[in-house]
Image (cartoon, rainbow, N blue to C red):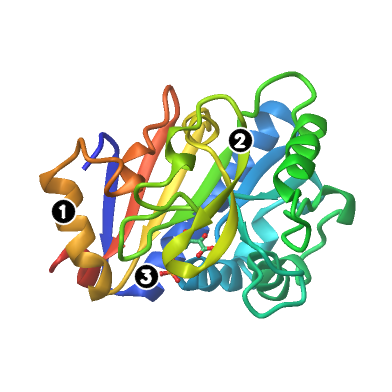
Amino acid sequence: MQPGRSWVGDDSAAVADEAARQFVDAAREAIALRGRFVVALAGGSTPKALYERLARPPLCEGVEWRRVEVLFGDERSVPPNHPDSNYGMARRALLDQVPLDAKKIHRIEGEHADADHRYAQVMHRVFSDGAPVFDLILLGMGPDGHTASLFPHTAALRERHLWVVKSRVDKLHTDRFTLTVPVLNAARAVIIVACGAEKAPALRAIAAHPDEGEVHPVLLVQPHPGTLTWLLDRAAAGQ
Ligand code: 6PG
């Protein structure tokens, strides 16, 4: 596995609890130091459980939500009310439940073919002082080792200039929109959550072949000088 810290919890509930606690700590630190917390949310089931925890007391009371700027790491080619929308999931689980400033919630407009260009403009406005440096990027990992919408053997993995791209994912017969590797690696902190036995083979493979980022794109996530934290449950970590 690439350099970083890893933490193993008993089950997916423990991972969601730990991720939610780390989110609150990162938010407090960023707001204390820089007056705002800029976070990119992930799609998927483990992130959903962590959003639900963040939305409830006591954790929801630990964040100054009006100072939080919410973006997304990736999105499917669907409108926001579609059941597959990452934004829609995050809205129901978290964004509608806490006192965020609606102007500071920036979704990827997956219903538009040029959502990648539109989102780059949004990012230019959010990071008005230059290249994007997120305070925290939350990521999941698919059983094939994809993260955000960086899928194995796709051109998106090799993008080094653009901040966000549209990526054809042949095996899903669809386009996805995703932040690129340089943006992920410029973050102050990245947390990857992975739970369940179906993630164990990919985790074993990435530990054994840490140079195979084309095969397991999650290996390309190597923030510098930021930090990388893996939060796993026992089933994913292989007991
Ligand atoms: C998406 C993602 C993706 C996800 C992983 C893990 O839109 O699907 O952002 O990278 O985080 O596939 O998803 P699960 O937690 O559901 O396994």
Residue 129 in the image: state x and y as whole percent: 76, 19
The residues tagged by marks 2 and 1 sit, at their Cα atoms, a distance apart of: 28 Å
Task: Please state the horizontal and vertical placement of residue 59, each as a whole percent of the image.
Answer: 60, 63
The numbered dot on residue 237 is: none
Q: How far apart are marks 3 and 2 (CA)?
A: 25 Å
Give residue 17's quadrant in the image.
bottom left
Camera-nearest label, 2 or 1? 1
Q: Distance between the residues labelled 1 and 3?
A: 24 Å
Q: Is residue 5 above or below residue 141?
A: above
- Left or right: where 36 falls relative to 173: right
User: In the drawing, does residue 6 fall left or right of residue 17?
Assistant: left
Contact flag, marks 3 and 2 (Cβ < 8 Å): no
Quadrant where the image shows the N terminus = top left
Looking at the picture, does residue 144 appear above or below residue 106? below
SS assignment at label 2: loop
Q: Name the residue under label 3.
A: 14
Looking at the rendered image, the disc whose residue lies closer to the viewer, 3 or 2, is 2
Residue at the far top: name it. 129
Ligand 1 within 8 Å, label 1 CB: no
Residue 9 location in percent, x, y? 28, 65
The residue lying toward the viewer, choosing from 74 and 14, is 74
Disc 1 to disc 3: CB gap under 8 Å: no
Q: Is mark 3 on a helix, strand or loop?
A: helix
Q: Residue at x 69, y 61 (%)?
A: 61
Identify the disc placed on residue 134. 2
| Amino acid bearing label 1 | Ala
Q: Residue 205 carries which label?
A: 1
The one of 195 and 182 positioned closer to us in this rendering: 182
Reading the chain from its start, which is encountered first: label 2 or label 1?
A: 2
Q: Earlier in the sequence, mark 1 or mark 3?
A: 3
Q: Badge 2: few (under 14), some or many (20 or more) residues near its Cα, within 10 Å?
A: many
Q: What residue type is labelled 3?
A: Ala
